[in-house]
Image (cartoon, rainbow, N blue to C red):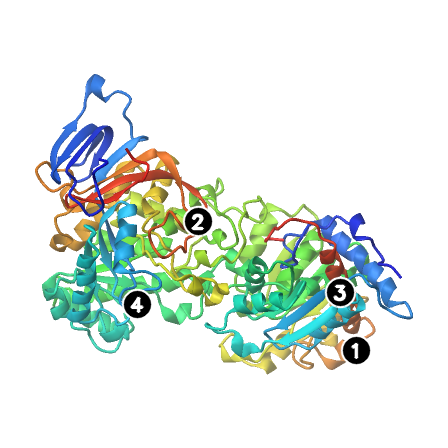
Amino acid sequence: MTAPVSPTQVSWHHRHVLDVDVLTAGEIDLVMRTTDAMHEVLARPIPKVPALRGKNVTIIFWEASTRTRVSFEVAAKNLSADVVNIAAGTSSVTKGESLVDTIRTVEALGADMIVMRHGTSGAPYLAAEVFSGHVLNGGDGWHAHPSQALLDLYTMRAHLGDLRGRKVVILGDILHSRVARSNIWTLTAAGADLWLCGPTTILRGFEAWAARWNAGRAAPGHGRFTVTSDVDAALRDADVVMALRLQRERMDAGLLPSLREYAARYGLTRERLALARPEALVMHPGPMNEGVEIAPDVAVLDRSVITEQVANGVAVRMALLFLLAGDRSEGGIGG
Amino acid sequence: MAELRTGGVAELLEISRAWLVDPVAGREGPGELIVRDGILQAVTWLEGAEAEGIGPDGVIVAPGLLDLHVHLREPGNEDAETIATGLAAAAHGGFTTVAAMPNTTPAADEPSVLARVAAAAAASGLPVELLLHGAVTVGRAGERLAALGELADAGAVGFSDDGAPVKTPVLLRNALLYLGPFGTPIFEHAEDPGLTAGAEAHEGVVSAILGLKGWPVAGEEAAVARDLAILAAVLPDARGARLHLTHLSTAPALDLVRRAKAAGLPVTCDVTPHHLAFTDEWVAGARRWAWEALDAAGAPRDPWADGALVARPYSTACRVNPPLRSADHAAAVLAALLDGTADAVVTDHAPHAQVDKEAEFGLAANGISGVETALSVLLAAVVAGKLPLRRAIEALTTGPAAVLGARAGRRGAARGLVEGAPADLVVVDAADRWTVTAEALASKGKNTPLLGRELPGRVLLTVANGRLAYRDAEAR
């Protein structure tokens, strides 16, 4: 049994996957095609290839997560990697317990690739600077969640094909969301008509980002980026609606009056969803607060692709690990 | 000059065919000077044929520079800097006088701490003069007034809880009242912590993209507005009260100062080289100067769109408080320097040990090691045609000297290039470039985003109070 794609055939020149902002449209396509190949692997009776045999993939999560960590673990094992799991715990994100020391230790223990999640924006760039292998960002602070954005894109493309001109709405706590930030890059690159919607307290700063984007880069007719607190305007004729998890801490921080008010004004209900196109996809990066940002009966609709996102997550992560293993680029911290 | 050694008397020094800048005399032009036995013996301004071919783009001689705001870390954090390394760094930067902030451990909140620091300066053998600020409150904790009068008697040139603002408005009011009869300014770090708690970067498009907690412009503007209101309120009772707002970084805060000055309030302010020349896009990995980061309409350009991201993002060398601002605010900082709203340029030299910077961006210490690059950064603005040379030198000499008044001392910054007095000057070759490397920096703090960058303006020689403070190894 051989790898579905030979590393020598691909043109992948990133030593790390830290953010999606550095990926060209062609590179994103390459990830999508490689994900297709990984789906073929997953459909086999024994869904395993030896692409990463003998490679040590160390998964370090400084923030608690089950879904993403397990998804990476399954992906790495499907590629025959040796997987080491380290739960660093949130307590170590303090001065004096050095991220750099941890990375150096993991390297000395034989890691070839590190998959990391960290509560601080930008932490994977520091890891990439000191680690001689490959770093895959499994989520950093509010900043980026590349594998999530790529699996979201894959899921949307699987249903809608070309996303140019398609209205995609991300609804909820944009300010604190690395999922939203990474999706902004991939969806605008794909030419989607991107809408970010939520209460203005948790949209702060994005109006300026959108203005700069629309003024500078987006070609007319597609790839626009709109920010609004008007949920009806956002949902009207949408092709995709992605709800984001709302955390209780936002009330404690004085950003929102109450969960009840949020659910009433911004929760994705059947009634609101009726504004979108009849076949509009419902997405959520998980874990869901059912009854807050998404109604339980919406989450289980036929057009809800939430469990499909989870399944695609394994294939996308296999693709990223596979592409990194085949990378022959010299250095290049940014990528 | 081969016989000169650092710390020794500048016995004989002849500088011919240089561009002299003397902001005290209000004059610049071709000239020559001779230093003998530490005394500036002759200053000759050249004219006519003799002056031909001498311009401000070659060797420049200016009075020794004065930095009102440095952190020398001793006592308490000698891993980051000591008085001796800090003064050596100052000399390398062309400074012959620096004023150290009191946020040491312990804080300089009573005279014994000042005495200890002064003793360390004397023991360093370096001729750079060290001026000292005292703390406004005990331990900079913002609860009780520090020994203000005793500190002033012991020579404190200013007072500050820098690193943070004076914690409560009522203490700032009381300190301004109490210090009124002394005439010593309070150096206020203008920040409303209620708006900046947990902040990591300038609040704007870059922080939105990078997912960093924003430090809003209003956090500085609100603090300045409050401080100016308090200053106005104390004047009837304390005519000598003086407020100095340090490291202002935003357009609205500088506008408030501009208007307060026009209204006659006794307020002064300073800006830093990094706030006028660096921008928040440096946190994302850009390294172009602030004046290169604006589009034709005066709005910040998009470094993600125009290929300006050349370094890795989240470099902690770019983490500083107040944060690097967007290019439009940097332009306002430069404008304030040009129109005199900003009285001085200070470096806010903030050296840190590697361990405090080799961390996640949000957990790294704030500050840039800047005393050795300040002159070069301003010269980069001069070379770009954004800042007249004379104004750059004023902002590093007469400007800061005026802020301190009589307590500024009688070094070059206050006196200029005058014959018969101890030589106190810097010789810098604007045509020569140097590369900022860890080895090239005398400071223990290597925390600057300029590391690896070639800058204009190599300091050849710094003479402080008649003695050699720094000499470039390659200088003749």
Q: Are marks 4 and 1 on the same chain?
A: no
The image shows residue A102, relative to residue B428, as above or below, that is: below
Chain label for disc 2: B
Mark found first going from the N terminus, 1 or 3: 3
For the residue marked with disc 1, what is the amino acid? Answer: Val
Question: Crowdedness of circle 1 by 10 Å Cα count: few (<14), some, many (20+)?
Answer: few
Find numbered disc 2 in the image and state the secondary structure of the residue it sits on: loop
Viewer can see residue A141: no
Please identify the quadrant where the C terminus of chain B is shown.
top left
Which of pointers 4 and 1 indicates the residue nearer the eye?
4
Q: Which mark is residue A180?
A: none
Residue B352 placement: quadrant: bottom left
Q: Is residue A17 left or right of residue B17?
A: right
Which of pointers 1 and 3 indicates the residue nearer the eye?
3
Question: Crowdedness of circle 4 by 10 Å Cα count: few (<14), some, many (20+)?
Answer: many
For the residue marked with disc 3, what is the amino acid? Answer: Gly
Q: Position of residue B458 (x, y in %)?
A: 33, 39
Work out how far the residue at label 3 is from the one at label 2, CA to CA, in angstroms.
39 Å
Which of pointers 3 and 2 indicates the residue nearer the eye?
3
Q: Which mark is residue A54?
A: 3
The residue at which mark 2 appears reads as B451
Find numbered disc 4 in the image and state the secondary structure of the residue it sits on: loop
